[in-house]
Image (spheres, rainbow, N blue to C red):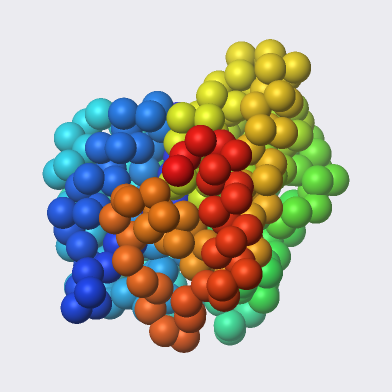
Amino acid sequence: MSFEGTIVAMVTPFTSEDEVDEEGMRENINYLIENGVDGILVAGTTGESATITHEEQRNMIDVLIDEVNGRVKTIAGAGSNSTKEALGLVKYAENSGADAALVITPYYNKPQPHGLVEHYKILAESTEVPIIVYNVPSRTGTDIGVESIGQIAGIDNIVAIKEANPDMDKVSMIYRKLLDLGLEDDFNILSGNDDLTLPMISMGAKGVISVVANVDPARMSQMVNQALEGDFNAAAQTHYELYGLMKALFVESNPVPSKECLNLMGRPAGHVRMPLAPLKEESKQKLAAVLKDLSLI
């Protein structure tokens, strides 16, 4: 199974009582599918994985799979800084019928390169659900090196990497490593940064796991499809239409701006959980201006 195109790292909407808004989730899932996305991820960083409970996480996976009902790919956030804990979440994703599990590199404990490889090997050998590796050194303190990625790419059942290291030369090195190993058709690179998706596709990436697509799924999907079809002039035009939004969604910590955008648009989102705090007023004004420019409000 190939994972490519536009996959949304979906926000987790909360009710005023601080419960996961299941009906809001379902509403957002349908909005995203109707606007052309290829897959939906729940319980990732943008879904506030750090402050949702495992019970909430498991329920969200179930809601996703039930509401999507086979229309697009379903990806379950399933990472942890404990291999044992990650394995339990990956097994839950498998048993629930998710199309893949997204597994972040273990954070805080800073495992050695061979420890990272072994971590993913244990998960892949203990389950059958496809695994997407998530490398985001700005949040985890660990960056998977190119040699380690090559080793991980050769493990059965590990199908892609969400690469959020902004070093563009590393993207070339990863793809060159895949070519050298003959794995370029079996293991996909997915962008973890919306603003770098266009150049990454030109270097061999197959899509994005996107924050921006929460807010403007139609244009983000359009840009990715244009690039994957080789129409880079059209893709560049769409990229620059979205560029202001790409930057505005990170004016404060993700997903605070994304949820504010959805609230401004009248879509289910609600508050962010502490220690994330509400958006500053000047940031709200910036977001509102960008949304008006895109005719989203």
Residue 65 appearing in the image: no
Q: Nearer the viewer, residue 200 or 48?
A: 48
Residue 165, compared with residue 54, is above or below; it is: above
Q: Position of residue 114 (x, y in %)?
A: 64, 67
- 14 left or right, relative to 135: left
The residue under the point 27% across, 68% down is 14
The image position of residue 218, as x and y in percent, is 46, 30
Q: Quadrant of the C terminus?
A: top left
At horizontal 53% and vertical 30% (from top left) the residue drawn is: 219
- Where residue 29 sits: x, y (%)? 28, 43
Q: Residue at x 38, y 78 (%)?
A: 273
Residue visible at 58% across and 83% down? 108
Q: Quadrant of residue 43?
A: bottom left
Q: Based on the displayed image, in which of its 4 quarters is residue 243 positioned?
A: top right
Report the number of discs. Answer: 0
Q: Quadrant of the N terminus?
A: top left
